[in-house]
Image: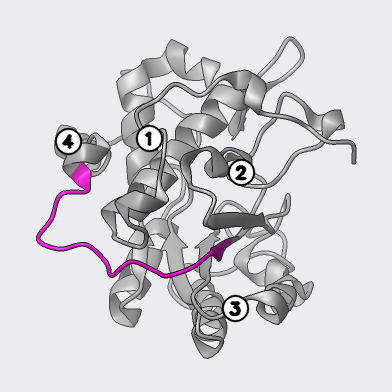
Amino acid sequence: MSLTRRQVTSAAVAALPLAVAAAGPALAAPHRGPRTLHIAGDSTAAQKYADAAPETGWGTALPFFLREDVTVANHAVNGRSSKSFIDEGRLAAILDVIRPGDLLLVQFGHNDEKAADPTRYTEPWTTFQDCLRQYLDGARSRGAQPVLATPVERRKFDADGDAVSTHGDYPASMRALATAERVALLDIQARSIALWQRLGVEETKRYFNWTATEQDNTHFNPPGAIAVARLVAGALLHRRVITPRDVRRLGAAIPESWITWPSA
């Protein structure tokens, strides 16, 4: 289903320039001392290696927008859902090293939608929320702060050139859980679909992993990863998970050359 004009406008408000979005009656109390932002997620966020270039996860670009006191530990892995990430022991590995004051940023949905794969599939209003609660409870039990992020939107447009949502009920389910659990929510689905709508059908190809041999409308190239990482950093600031002193370069151009793909 394509977005209505009202939905696009609402999403665009969520993606306002950071100077506006960060405004509010009060900011979060500054965290004292260094901390780590741990990412639990899938291939849209994951570190890519030389054999996958130019494909780039947004988690690779996120450190460009955070100051040195906030270290990014990117645990995201290709193909994982909120369920399979837990079943493979990856959440347990994060909880072994996470410290009081750290952040656990959780973004899933792309692979939870794989109804034909029981190792990954979760139902949005039941098992998806059940799995997400394990991340929330685990982080809280260790004195860390959990943060939920709705899944970044794919590149899909209808015949009228309107950006189309592809994630079904998963974003709405995560929003409802964040409200119920009183957890900060980064609505990256809304912010990203508003960005794709603004860029349009042809311009968005410059942000996804379109090459001479592949037309990938899910994964990003360096410009796309940088753009989504900027949305994530802006949402972290807007939701007062971090403070203005924790961010940098939010309005600056980031050279694509800063993205690197290490050997596997």
Q: Label for residue 99?
A: 3
The CA distance from mark 4 to mark 1 is: 22 Å
Residue at the front extreme? 33
Three-letter code for the amino acid on which mark 4 is drawn: Thr
- Percent across and percent down for residue 80 are 70, 58
Cα separation between marks 1 and 2? 21 Å
- As drawn, the label of residue 191 is none
Q: Amino acid at mark 2?
A: Thr
Q: Residue 173's spot in the image, x, y percent?
A: 38, 66
Mark 4–mark 2 distance (CA, rounded to whole Å): 25 Å
Name the residue rendered at 59%, 56% in the picture. 71
Mark 1 lies on a secondary structure that is: loop
Query: Dot 4, how many residues are within 10 Å of its Cα: few (below 14), some (14-19), or many (20+)?
Result: few
Tag in front: 4 or 1: 1
- Find the residue positioned furthest to the left: 25
Instruction: From the image, give the main secondary structure of the stretch colored magenta.
Output: loop
Question: Which amino acid does the dot numbered 1 rest on?
Answer: Leu
Q: Whole-Å distance between the Cαs marked 2 and 3? A: 25 Å
Label annotation for residue 250: 1
Helix, strand or loop at label 4? It is helix
x, y percent for residue 179? 28, 74
| Residue 147 picture quarter | bottom left
Identify which residue is drawn at 13% across, 55% down. Answer: 24
Q: Which residues are magenta?
A: 21-37
Mark number displayed over residue 44: 2
Residue wearing tag 4: 9
